[in-house]
Amino acid sequence: MEYTRLGRTGLLVSRICLGTMNFGWQIGETESHAILDRAYEKGVNFVDTATMYGRETGDGLSERFIGRWFDKAGHRDRIVLATKVYAPMTERPNDGGLSARHIIAACEASLRRLRTDWIDLYQMHHVQRDIPWEEIWQATETLVVQGKVRYVGSSNFAGWHLARAQAAAERRNFLGLVSEQCKYNLLTRHVELEVLPAAIELGIGILPYSPLHFGALSGALRQLDLPLAALRTELSAGTLARLEELFPPVGNGGPGPEAWAW
């Protein structure tokens, strides 16, 4: 397994992160634990989930599966654990979004479901434009000071959202975002325009989700071994050029504004 630093931090994570969106939705607990076992055996130390994964009515089933795996396997101290906050967990008005109240309450609930004392990477699952960054950072700083969260990340942010978030964090002398999880594959390349350039400039790591476009780019729906093999595969210049022809980038390619202007 290859390891790399998470953004500009000193934290080392496996280059393959095990996403668990299908835990509870498509596969049961036994198979979910088998996948976690297989990933751990192969050196994957990075596991990503979310409050909404596997749930029907706010039960956080994916997190519960992972928590019971920690109880059974005993690997919590060797895993970099990431989860997300944003999705409404009930129909009550304050049980969703990025208010300080929900961020802290959702973290406490995730800790209980995951059966752990801390979350390594706590990610905002989506941007919420009508909540000030001062409120969001105040809540996450509280969790960091309490030792319940180590790092903070985002997901599905635009490039200018990353810039606004970091500017607000810097005013508070806070580390701010260390990662952005975005949809990125040969069929979905919009993040190349502004998200990737902003992340590079700000030292924010990129966690691409759906790299095989939900299996469409793999030729078939397969298990964990396929992405692991990708780490050992180096594509030739000719193959890369052919992929660019088959799956052209947005506009002229590269970051904006050059992608659409001179």
Image: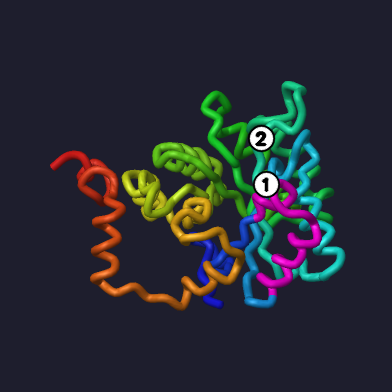
Residue at which label 1 appears: 50
User: With 120 as the anchor, is 118 left or right in this view?
Assistant: right
Q: At x 55% / y 51%, what residue is drawn?
A: 175
User: With 18 as the anchor, is 171 left or right in this view?
Assistant: left
Vertical comparison of 180 with 156: above or below: below
Q: Secondary structure at mark 2?
A: loop
Near-viewer residue (177 or 69): 69
Magenta stretch? Answer: 20-40
Q: Secondary structure at mark 1?
A: loop
Near-viewer residue (190 or 238): 238
Q: How busy is the neighbourhood of tag 2: few (under 14 within 10 Å), some, or many (20 plus)?
A: some
User: With 252 as the anchor, is 144 left or right in this view?
Assistant: right
Vertical comparison of 115 with 54: above or below: below
**Which of the image's four quarters has the C terminus?**
top left
In the rendered structure, are the residues bearing label 2 and label 1 in contact, judged by CB atoms less than 8 Å apart?
A: yes
In this orientation, does residue 204 appear? no
Vertical comparison of 42 with 109: above or below: below
Which amino acid does the dot numbered 2 rest on? Ala
In this orientation, does residue 9 appear? yes
Residue at which label 2 appears: 87
Q: At x 63% / y 76%, what residue is drawn?
A: 43
x, y (%) of residue 30? 80, 61
x, y (%) of residue 95? 74, 29
Which amino acid does the dot numbered 1 rest on? Ala
Residue 201: mark in rendering: none
Seen from this angle, which residue lies furthest left? 262
Q: Earlier in the sequence, mark 2 or mark 1?
A: 1
Q: How busy is the neighbourhood of tag 1: few (under 14 within 10 Å), some, or many (20 plus)?
A: many
